[in-house]
Image (spheres, rainbow, N blue to C red):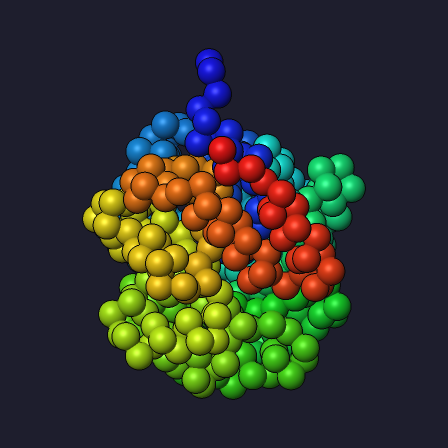
Amino acid sequence: MPLDPLEDFVRRLPKAELHLHIEGTLEPELMFALAQRNGLPMAYPSVEALRAAYDFSNLQDFLDIYYQGAAVLLTCEDFHDLGMAYFRRLAADGGVHAEIFFDPQTHTHRGVGMDVVIEGLLSAMDAAETSLGVTSRLILCFLRHLDEADAFATLEAAKPWLSRLTGVGLDSSELGHPPAKFARVLAAARDLGLKVMVHAGEEGPPDYVWEAVDLIKVDRIDHGNRALEDDKLVRRLITDQTTLTVCPLSNLKLCVVQDLRSHPLKKMLELGLAATVNSDDPAYFGGYIVDNYVETARALSLSRSDLVQLARNSFTGSFLPQAEKAAWLSKLDSISLI
Ligand code: ADE
Ligand code: ZN
C-alpha cells in the first residue's frame, strides 16, 4: 500500500504524548491474555464482543467499562507488559516521549499493592528507554469520585517512589467532583515537589477550569474544551500559556463533540492557546497518537504548519528538562513543510 502523505508526515514528526492513561491502553487481546494467565473469568465471550461494547454516550459509560477491564491486571509482569505494549506503539508512531497517568486506587482497592503497580510500570519505562529510545515520566492520578482521605492515603502509600514520580493528576467522573474537592491533597503533592494537573472542562463547566487555574494553580489542564465557553478564561489561558492536553478521538467517542469537524482544536490554535494532541485511552477510543493527529487534521483541514505547532506544544508543555525540550524543538525547526 502506498504511504499516505499526511500520515507519513505526522509519523515522522517527533512528538510527545502528555495525556495518556496507561490502563486505557489495555487492548482487548491483551486483556483476554492476562485474564487467562491469571485464571480470571471474562465478562465477554470474545475480543469482538468486548470491542462491540465500546459504544459510549458519555464519560461515565466509558469509565464503568474501563475500571472493569483493569481488573485483569494483577502482577508486576502484567503492568510491565501493559506499559511495553504502549511504548512499542508510541515508538512506531514516531513518539519520542510520554508522560503517562496511572490510577493506583483502581488497583489498590482490589488488593493489588502499590509496589506491584509502580514497579511494573517503572520497569517498562526503563526498558522502553533502553530498547526503543522513548523517554517517559510517571504521573499518579487521584480518582475524583472517591474522597479526599482516600487520595491522601494514596499519596502516602506512593511516597517510597517519590523520586520516580513527576506529578499528580485528577481524573475519573468530573461532574459533581470539582477540583476544589482535592485542593488540599494536590497542594500537599506540590509541597513534595510534584507537578500538578487536573482533568477539567471535559464534561465539567468553565468554573472547574477556573478552579484549576486560580485555586489549584495547575501546571497543565487535561482537556480544557469547555474553557472556550468563557472569553475571560480563554484570555487567561493564553496569557499564562497553560498547556491544554486535548484528546480529539476521546472527545468524539465520549460525545464531548458530536463530530470531529466541530472539534475546537483548530480554534484553540488560532486563538494562540497552547493546545496539544493526545490519545487519552487509545484502546477504547479507536486510535493512538498518529490517528488523533491525522483524523483531526483531515476533519479540520489543519495545515502542516499547524501539525508542527502541535508537536512543538507537546515539548514545551512537557516536564522534560529545558535542554531536552530545546533539542526536540530544534529538530522540529528543521522539518520541511512540503
Ligand atoms: N480516566 C481515564 N480516561 C479518562 C478521561 N478521559 N476523563 C476522566 N477520567 C479518565
Ligand atoms: Zn484523560
Compared to residue 309, the image places residue 219 above or below, namely below
Between 114 and 176, which is closer to the camera in this rendering? 176
Vertical relation: 246 (above or below) 289: below
The picture places residue 145, in percent across and down from the top left corner, at: 39, 70
Q: Residue at x 35, y 63 (%)?
A: 271
Q: Position of residue 99 (x, y in %)?
A: 59, 56
Please tell me which residue lies in front, 6 or 62: 6
On screen, residue 119 versus residue 32, left or right, reads: right
Q: Is residue 318 left or right of residue 70?
A: right
Q: Is residue 190 shown left or right of residue 308?
A: right
Residue 193 seen in the current view: yes
Camera sees residue 177: no
Seen at 48% across and 42% down, the residue is 289
Q: Position of residue 31 (x, y in %)?
A: 50, 37
| Residue at the image position 71 percent from the left and 37 percent from the top | 132
Question: Residue at point 61% right, 78% down?
Answer: 189
Residue most extreme to the top: 1
